[in-house]
Image (cartoon, rainbow, N blue to C red):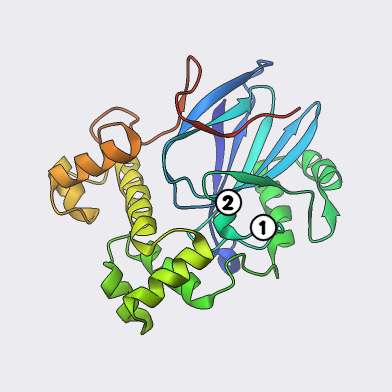
Amino acid sequence: MTTAFLGKPAPDLAQQIEMCWSLTSCGENGTAFYELLPDSDMNLVFRFSSTGCRMVLMGPLTEKASVELHDASDYFCIRFRPGQALDLADVHPAELIDTYVDIDKIRGERIDSLADRLHSLPDPASRQLVIEDLLRKSRPLVRDERCRQATALLDAHGGRLQVTELAAELGLHVRSLERIFIDQLGMTPKRLARLVRLQHLFARMRSGSFGSLADLAHASGYTDQSHMIRDVRELTGRLPGETDSCDARRLEGSPQTRIVHRYRG
């Protein structure tokens, strides 16, 4: 499979959606496992194939995991910003950590009907417009506004805010902020900040906008290069200097990590 499309969200949805992407089939007819790295975001994933369609909402990944994808299917995804996913399923956000939930309909439209509409469109950009229109006026999945504000601040600062700084920004005690995060997201603000920082580090690595690993560590909010290497290796099992170290990989054998999603025909 290859990434065929990366699209920016509509301006009125940019606070909730980070990007849209799609994967196109390479023509094979089988499944394969792909290794995913820790991720602070939720993803709404739609699969098209000759055997049917499926939509799932995948939660944040706190550790490396594996997903099973179908090589003869096309995938379209809406990637939500940390803590900003919309209410598309009867589930608490904390229940989605390291797992997913199937979605049968969006704003009253069943997935099979939506699949017919999307399949008839000429390109992923057209599909994006349809999905975004359905997402408008949806309620936030995270109901506590303070939690949404806190996650937005962490994202805006690349995960580089200390918990004390974050609590002060919101006028809360640290203990109160931690209780809100655990209740709403199922993780502490420190843990989410670490995942957000990792994602922003990956973005810098992909862009190549750094001169050395020391510069990369400083720009990404690590105390030094050793701290960055240690944190990346602990979370991903990889080193920041490795080729494609920040991208998903197709596994040649059985996954050694938790399988968070399996293909279903």
At 30% from the left and 69% from the top, the residue drawn is 163
At 27% from the left and 36% from the top, the residue drawn is 233
Amino acid residing under circle 1: Val
Question: What element does badge 2 sit on?
Answer: helix
Residue 144 in the image: above or below residue 36? below
Which of the 4 image quarters holds residue 93? Answer: bottom right
Please name whichever residue, 19 or 42, is drawn nearer the observer in this view of the structure. Answer: 42
Amino acid residing under circle 2: Leu
Going from N to C along the chain, the mark reached first, 2 or 1, is 1
Please name whichever residue, 27 or 97, is drawn nearer the observer in this view of the structure. Answer: 97
At 36% from the left and 47% from the top, the residue drawn is 203
Residue pointed to by mark 2: 96
The percent position of residue 253, horizontal first and vertical second, equals: 49, 14
The percent position of residue 228, horizontal first and vertical second, equals: 21, 45
What label does residue 234 carry, if any? Answer: none
Residue pointed to by mark 1: 91
Whether residue 157 is visible, yes or no, is yes
155 to the left or right of 216: right
At 65% from the left and 47% from the top, the residue drawn is 125
The percent position of residue 251, horizontal first and vertical second, equals: 47, 20
The percent position of residue 174, horizontal first and vertical second, equals: 32, 75
97 to the left or right of 63: right
Please name whichever residue, 58 or 99, is drawn nearer the observer in this view of the structure. Answer: 99
Q: Are marks 2 and 1 in contact (CB under 8 Å)?
A: yes
